[in-house]
């Protein structure tokens, strides 16, 4: 696309031509021809520089294989210009605009200007910049915007370099020093009434080949006149269920990344990390309409992957999930938005003497505002439910409030 400079140059050449035509001075014709000839020459010399340009992008996080919210990441750009020989024109005076979705909204990397003086044919330029990851989620880098006005600034050429770059950022995880629910209930075994190996006898059965002779029940042998062996109940490590409320509550427009739901995700990740460190099987209970939760015990990477992608877009409240008849031994309920209907279910489970922890985020304390969770916390506390009311702290002290 021609710039204003090219029109000014052509107009100047035309004026010199008129002057030469009136005065019949030869050198004025030469000047007019030279000025007019610069325009097509500029178009010809810069015709293919951007068209052959290719680029690649990599996002690195130092020695860590994964990216977490709050980490510092390094973004590397590589620009290459294929070609060889004098007939291959270089790419010069490149102005790049890199839009990094990992940066905070007010960070310069959201629209980072980069200037590259030139890339010769067959050459490569390496660029890098650091950015502090602002929030979790699946981030997609937009195309790299490239503009050049080489060689004389007479024509502006633009191109969007498609470099599909998707980055999954896990939520921030802070290792907890202790978690009362798992620490004061040293339940090492949970007995399941089907055949297994433990120290608790659930009955006797006929002896089978391969059974240990030490487990023969001699009284039953004498009574039934056949070999009988003891049958033991199966013992298993108790599990922890993380119940996260992902219902689409009427959250106000966020005034930043600090929202009750985002803090709830961080708390879920930190509680899950503590349980994983203590070797408790982890389970997820969340509305599958927002994001299908994996069934059965989940590994630590699977939990992080789920918490990185989840958004408050569910259609079912947490009441429907907590009404499940069978849940693992320990249950951690995380409520980013107060829901009075949950109180009765949690009080019932507490009366069943099950391990329980209710974590309530207080929307009223967050920058965007919202209803107070203090009345619900008081109601749960009166019912004997272990409750933690987490309020917004500008210093980010959410883990300490557990």
Image (spheres, rainbow, N blue to C red):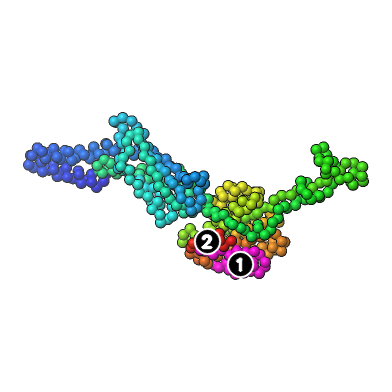
Residue 325 is covered by the magenta coloring: no
> Is residue 79 visible to the viewer in this orientation of the structure?
yes
In the picture, measured across the screen, residue 208 lies left or right of residue 260, that is right
Q: Classify 10 Å Cα crowding around label 2: few (below 14), some (14-19), many (20 and above).
A: few
In the picture, measured across the screen, residue 289 lies left or right of residue 6, that is right
Residue 151 spot, x, y in % from top left: 26, 40
Q: Quadrant of residue 107?
A: bottom left
Residue drawn at (8%, 42%), measured in percent from left and top? Answer: 22
Instruction: Decide which of 162, 188 is in the foreground and name it.
Output: 188
Residue 98 spot, x, y in % from top left: 39, 47
Residue drawn at (16%, 38%), measured in percent from left and top? Answer: 33
| Front label number (2 vs 1) | 2
Label 2 element class: loop
Asked if the residues shown at circle 2 and circle 1 are in contact, with their CB atoms under 8 angstroms apart, the answer is: no
Residue 354 spot, x, y in % from top left: 70, 59
Q: Earlier in the sequence, mark 2 or mark 1?
A: 1
Q: Quadrant of the C terminus?
A: bottom right
Residue drawn at (62%, 48%), measured in percent from left and top? Answer: 298
Label 1 element class: helix
The magenta segment is 370-393
Q: Quadrant of residue 317?
A: bottom right
Residue 386 is covered by the magenta coloring: yes
Residue drawn at (24%, 47%), measured in percent from left and top? Answer: 4
Give me the disc on residue 377. 1
Q: Quadrant of the N terminus?
A: top left
Q: What residue does disc 2 label?
A: 397
> Is residue 285 visible to the viewer in this orientation of the structure?
no
């Amino acid at each position: 696309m021609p710039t204003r400079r090219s029109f000014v140059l052509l107009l100047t050449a035309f004026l010199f031509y008129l002057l030469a035509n009136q005065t019949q001075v030869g050198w004025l014709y030469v000047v007019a021809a030279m000025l007019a000839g610069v325009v097509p020459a500029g178009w010809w010399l810069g015709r293919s520089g951007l068209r052959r340009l290719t680029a690649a992008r990599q996002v690195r996080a130092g020695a860590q294989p994964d990216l977490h919210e709050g980490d510092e990441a390094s973004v590397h750009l590589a620009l290459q210009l294929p070609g060889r020989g004098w007939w291959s024109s270089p790419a010069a005076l490149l102005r790049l605009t890199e839009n990094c979705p990992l940066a905070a909204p007010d960070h310069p990397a959201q629209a980072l200007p980069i200037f590259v003086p030139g890339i010769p044919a067959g050459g490569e330029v390496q660029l890098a910049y650091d950015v502090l990851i602002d929030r979790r989620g699946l981030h997609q880098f937009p195309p790299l915007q490239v503009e050049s006005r080489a060689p004389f600034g007479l024509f502006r050429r633009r191109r969007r370099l498609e470099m599909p770059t998707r980055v999954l950022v896990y939520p921030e995880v802070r290792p907890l020093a202790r978690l009362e629910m798992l620490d004061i209930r040293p339940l090492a075994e949970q007995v399941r009434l089907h055949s297994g190996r433990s120290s608790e006898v659930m009955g006797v059965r006929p002896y089978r080949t391969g059974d240990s002779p030490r487990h023969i029940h001699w009284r039953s042998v004498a009574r039934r006149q056949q070999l009988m062996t003891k049958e033991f109940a199966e013992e298993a490590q108790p599990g922890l269920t993380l119940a996260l409320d992902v219902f689409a509550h009427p959250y106000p427009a966020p005034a930043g990344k600090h929202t009750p739901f985002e803090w709830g995700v961080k708390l879920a990740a930190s509680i899950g990390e503590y349980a994983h460190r203590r070797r408790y099987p982890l389970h997820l209970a969340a509305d599958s309409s927002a994001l299908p939760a994996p069934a059965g015990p989940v590994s630590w990477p699977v939990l992080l992957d789920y918490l990185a992608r989840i958004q408050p877009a569910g259609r079912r409240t947490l009441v429907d999930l907590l009404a499940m008849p069978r849940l693992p031994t320990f249950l951690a309920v995380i409520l980013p938005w107060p829901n009075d209907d949950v109180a009765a279910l949690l009080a019932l489970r507490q009366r069943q003497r099950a391990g329980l922890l209710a974590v309530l985020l207080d929307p009223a304390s967050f920058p965007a505002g919202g209803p107070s969770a203090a009345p619900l916390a008081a109601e749960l506390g009166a019912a004997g439910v272990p409750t933690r009311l987490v309020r917004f702290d500008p210093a980010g002290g959410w883990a300490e409030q557990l």
